[in-house]
Image: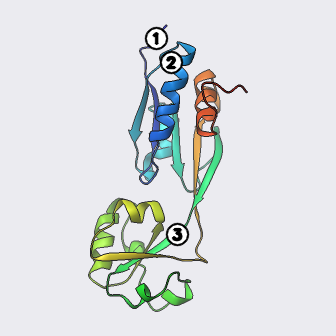
Amino acid sequence: MQDLTPFRVGFVPGVTPDKWDRSWTEHERASRRWRRLELVPVAVVDQARLLREGALDMCLVRGEIDRDGLHLVALYREVPVAVVAKDHPATAYDELTLADLADELDILQEFTDLDLPMAIETAAAGSGYVLVPMSLARLHHRKDVEYRPVTDAEESPIGLAWLVSRDDEDCQQFVGVVRGRTARSSR
């Protein structure tokens, strides 16, 4: 029997939940439950609030969040990269350290995460660099910038979070999906 209420999973920029959407659909068909998955783009600044307000059933989150009342499954950590102008001296190297960038201005400190396209535009003009997770550099890639891994910068954790009070069969099923369980596998 189909549940007409969608199972709402938020995801922050840079996270690509498409493969989990396909796995969810495959599992739902196999179990004949047919609950539709709705993927909801969410800004990092809103991720915990939307979970706590009940606007989302689960959320693929970035960074550290207040875990009070939340379950959190760590999924992976993203490599930090420096985004610089295409003709910046840093592009001569395959990877960098924070010491290599010590004389540069980290532009993102002047902008909020919501202003990332503007920060990257400023870096493209040669006014400094932007330190972001690699997925965000790829998401906002432009022809006039390049990015290089920064080996000693802190990695960005990605996790799956949901309310402790909302720990139901659907949440556990989605945890299984992101952990690689298929419709044919068992717990």
* Mark carried by residue 65: none
- The local crowd at label 3, few if under 14, some if 14 to 19, many if 20 or more residues have their Cα within 10 Å, is many
Tell me how far mark 1 sits from mark 2, CA to CA: 10 Å
Whichever of labels 1 and 2 marks the residue nearer the N terminus, that label is: 1
Give the secondary structure at mark 3. strand
Q: Amino acid at mark 1?
A: Gln
Q: Which residue is painted at 60% across and 70% down in the image?
A: 154
Residue 34, image x and y in percent? 47, 16
CB contact under 8 Å: marks 1 and 2: no
Residue 176, image x and y in percent? 64, 33
* Mark carried by residue 29: 2
Q: Amino acid at mark 3?
A: Pro
Q: Is residue 92 above or below residue 179?
A: below
Residue 182, image x and y in percent? 61, 30
Name the quadrant of the C terminus: top right
Q: Relative to 165, is 13 on the left or the right?
A: left
Q: Relative to 94, is 185 on the left or the right?
A: right
Q: Relative to 28, is 86 on the left or the right?
A: left
Whichever of labels 3 and 1 marks the residue nearer the N terminus, that label is: 1
Q: Which residue is mark 1?
A: 2
Give the secondary structure at mark 1. loop
Q: Relative to 86, is 167 on the left or the right?
A: right
Residue 160, image x and y in percent? 58, 42
Q: Nearer the viewer, mark 3 or mark 2?
A: 2
Q: Which residue is mark 3?
A: 80
Q: Which residue is painted at 52% across and 44% down in the image?
A: 60
